[in-house]
Image (cartoon, grey):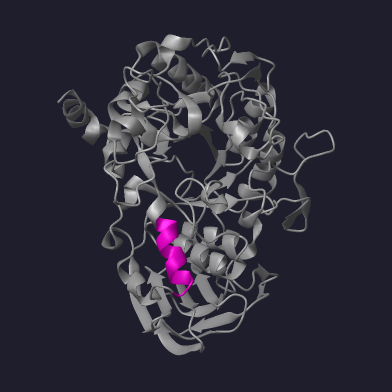
Amino acid sequence: MIYQLLLGTFFNYALSAYTDPYCIGGRDGIVHLFEWKWNDIAAECEKFLGPYGFCAVQTSPANENRIVTNPYRPWWERYQPVSYKIHTRSGSEDEFRNMVEKCQQSGVRIYVDVVINHMTGAGGQGFGTNGTFYDGDNLHFPGVPYGPTDFNDGSLCHSCDMNIHNYDNVEEVRNCRLSTLLDLKMGSDYVRDQVSGYLNRLIDFGVVGFRVDAAKHMWPEDLIELFNKVKDLPIGGRPFVYQEVIDQGGEPIKGEEYLATGRIINFRFGLQLANVFRRQSAMKYLSSWGTGWGMWASDSVVNFIDNHDNQRGHGGGGGVLTHWEPKPYKMASAFMLAHPYGMPRIMSSYEYNRANNYEGPPHNSDMTTASVQINGMRCTNGWSCEHRWSQIYNMVGFRNMVSGTALNNWWSGADYQIAFSRGDRGFIALNLEGFDINQNLQTGLPAGRYCDVISGDIENDECTGKTVEVQNDGTAHINVCSDCDDPVLAIHIGAKIGSAPRRL
C-alpha cells in the first residue's frame, strides 16, 4: 500500500522531472564510450562529438572499483564498487572534472553509469583503483563507509546462499545478491545518504544524467526516496535518469514500475530489430514500430541496438546485432536514428577475443588503458568506434535535422523494403530484398538535389556519394541496391546541394 501511495504521489511529477535529457539545440543521441579514458572523451567531445551533433556521452562508472586479477583486469571489474571516490583506470577526479567541462563547452552532455545496487562480490579482500582497502568477507568498505548492517541479510533475502536464482520471485530479485555482488540495503536512509552524496557530487562537477545499473534489483519505492535526496541541476530541473530494467516479458517485474524515477532502457528494441534485419521478421511490419510492438511510450525509453553486456551474451543478451555483423548493424542503426520513437543510444566498442569476453579495454604493457588513436575518421589501436562510422554519425545528423517532425509517407514495396519521410525535412529507404528498390516515391522534401548521407557527404558544394533529385511535388526516383554493403539511402534538408550543409 505504501508503495502504491508513493507511486501515486510522485508518478505525474517524475514523468516530466527525470526524462529530459537536456540536449542542446535540437540534438538527440547518446554515445556510450565504453571504457574510454576521461582525457580521450574530452578530446572526442571537442574534435568530433560536438561538431557532429551528438547530444551526450554515457561514460563507464566513475567511482573506485575492485582490482580483479583473475581473470586479469576484466571489463566487469568496473561494476564492483569499493568506494564512491572518483578514480578508476579511466582517470583521476581532476581528469573527470576537466572532461565534463570540455564536453559541456562543446555542447555535449555527460551521463554517468552509476553502480549503486551493490558493492564488490562476496568474499575476498583487497584494494581498489584509488588504493582503498575493502573486506568483502566481512562486508567492510571503509572508503564509504559501509559495514555489515548496510547490506541485505537473511531477514530480507531467503535464498539458500543469498544469491538470486528465481526471477519469478520478486523479493529474491530485489533483496538478494546479483551474481554474488553484495546487495546494499537501499531501504536504509543511511545508505541512501551515501549514494545520493555521490550523485550530488557528480552533479556539482556538471554531470546532468545517470544510467542506473541494475535498477531492476532495487525496489522502485527505494529509488523514489533516493532521488528525493538528489539535488536539482545547476542549469535547473531534475537530472536525466535512465534505468537498467531488463524486461523482455514473461517475468513479474515490469519496466513501467520504474517510470516514477525516469526512463527505462528498452531491451526489447534491439532484440526485435535484430530479428528484422536478420530477415526473421518482415521489415514491412515496422510501420507500427514502438508502442505497436508492445513497447513503452516514446518519452519513457532509451533505445539501443546493443550494449556492453548483451554484445557479450550477458544482461538479457543473445541474439542482438553487434559490430561483428556490420551490414545489418548499420542498417538497424540507421532505422533507429531515422525513426521518431524514443531516444537512441549508440554503442562504441573495442575489439576483444570473443572466446574471452571478459577482456578489458585495449591496454599498454603495464595494463593501463591504451589511448584511443584516430586515423582519418576511424579509430585504431583496438578501439572499434562504431559512432565514427559514417553511416552512423551522418544519421545522427539526419535525426537532428528532422527533430520534432512526424513519420509520414510510409511505403513498403515488399516484405523487406521500406521507406518513409520525416515531415518535410528527411527521407530514408532501406532494402533487404534480393532485388533493388527502383521506384518513384514521395519524399515529402522541397524540390532540389540532395546528397545521400549514407554513401557520401557534401564537399565543396558537391556530393561525394549518390544524389537524389526531388521534384516540385516532393517525389523522387529512389534506387537502393540489394547486393551492396549499405542498402540504405537517406537525404535531409541539411544535405541539399546548393545550400550550406548543416549540422546541429
The residue drawn where x is 43% and y is 89% is 440
Residue nearer the viewer, 16 or 152 = 152
**Count of numbered badges drawn on the protein:** 0
Residue 129: % across, % down: 68, 23
**The residue stretch that appears in magenta:** 269-279
Decide if residue 409 is on the left or right side of residue 135.
Answer: left
Residue nearer the viewer, 427 or 8 = 8
Q: Residue furthest front?
A: 160
Decide if residue 267 is on the left or right side of residue 259.
Answer: right
When the figure is inspected, residue 152 is found, relative to residue 76, above or below; the finding is: above
Q: Residue 241: within the magenta? A: no
Location of residue 245 (image quadrant): top left
Q: Is residue 73 visible?
A: yes
Residue nearer the viewer, 330 or 57 = 330
Residue nearer the viewer, 9 or 174 = 174
Helix, strand or loop for the magenta stretch, by majority: helix
Q: Is residue 19 visible?
A: no
Residue 85: % across, % down: 60, 18
The residue drawn where x is 62% and y is 62% is 324
Residue 213: % across, % down: 46, 35
Q: In which quadrant is the N terminus drawn?
A: top left
The residue drawn where x is 35% and y is 47% is 247
Residue 385: % across, % down: 66, 53
